[in-house]
Amino acid sequence: MKVLSIDIGGTHVKILLSGEEVPRKTTSGHDFTPDQLVKDVAVLAKGWKYDVISIGFPAPVHNNLPVAEPFNLGGGWIDFNYEKAFGCPVKMINDAAMQALGSYKGGKMLFLGLGTGLGSAVVTDQALLPLELGHLPFKKKTFEDYVGNRSLEKKGKATWKKHVFETVELLTAAILPDYVVLGGGNAKVLKALPPACLAGENANAFEGGFRMWSGPADSLSTPDPAVQKASRASRQRKTAKISVKKPKRS
């Protein structure tokens, strides 16, 4: 089965066919609509034969459909009939979740996407759980307000980096993953990663699209050495924080 993986972003749309190595892309933007997506994909995918489509969408998705219009694109996405327009079966998830699925290497993984906002998802060998952790309250704002692109531009790299490290520490303490993958376009700003973190690749979104038709458990249950190392570091940090103070003798 040939899968066409589509990664929709605020400035570009990228596609890749399973078995191919070089993605193809076009521009998107504030006026970009689902009708334009279908037209552009038809042009971009010329010469490629595919059976099904995976879409990574830059807004919340539930039951294979958008539940909100994307901030950086045009309208009309919620009620659009994607399978009818493309003429084949279509699966859709949040773009951060698709990159998370493609980044997964075993164990319990927390994915955080540093971009316009804060994308998030948890993947285990049994399930993919898209999250909206970026909208959780944090210091009278939200996590996204501190680690999103606006904060990077307004506060500068040094302050933004501190917020990223603090966010990773807090979310890791809450979710207790074996390791964290930091992806998204702004992850490259970090010259050093927080403890127990791995660097994600944006190209992993395509792999996530391919895996959407096979399931996260297929061939993913054995962690690779990098994951095992990050997992050990994570456990050591958790253990170090657990201490029992002995009562003073009177």
Image (cartoon, rainbow, N blue to C red):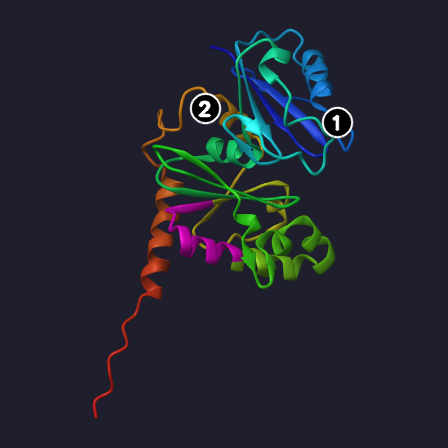
What's the distance in space between the residues labelled 1 and 2, CA to CA? 27 Å
Which amino acid type is marked by label 1?
Phe
Q: Where's residue 21, x and y in %?
A: 57, 19
* Quarter of the rendering containing residue 249: bottom left
Q: Which mark is residue 211?
A: 2
The residue sitting at 57% across, 36% down in the picture is 60
Instruction: Answer few, some or many: residues within 10 Å of disc 1's Cα (few below 14, many 20 plus, some between 14 and 19).
Output: some
At x 52%, y 25%, the residue is 64
Q: Is residue 179 magenta?
A: yes
The residue where tag 1 is placed is: 32
At label 2, the amino acid type is: Arg
The disc label shown at residue 92, or none: none
Quarter of the image for the C terminus: give it.
bottom left
Label 1 with label 2: CB-CB less than 8 Å: no
Above/below status of 162 relative to 20:
below
Residue farthest along the right direction in this orientation: 31
Q: Residue furthest front?
A: 79
Q: Percent x, y for residue 214?
A: 41, 20
Up the image or down, 215 lies above or below 156; here it is: above
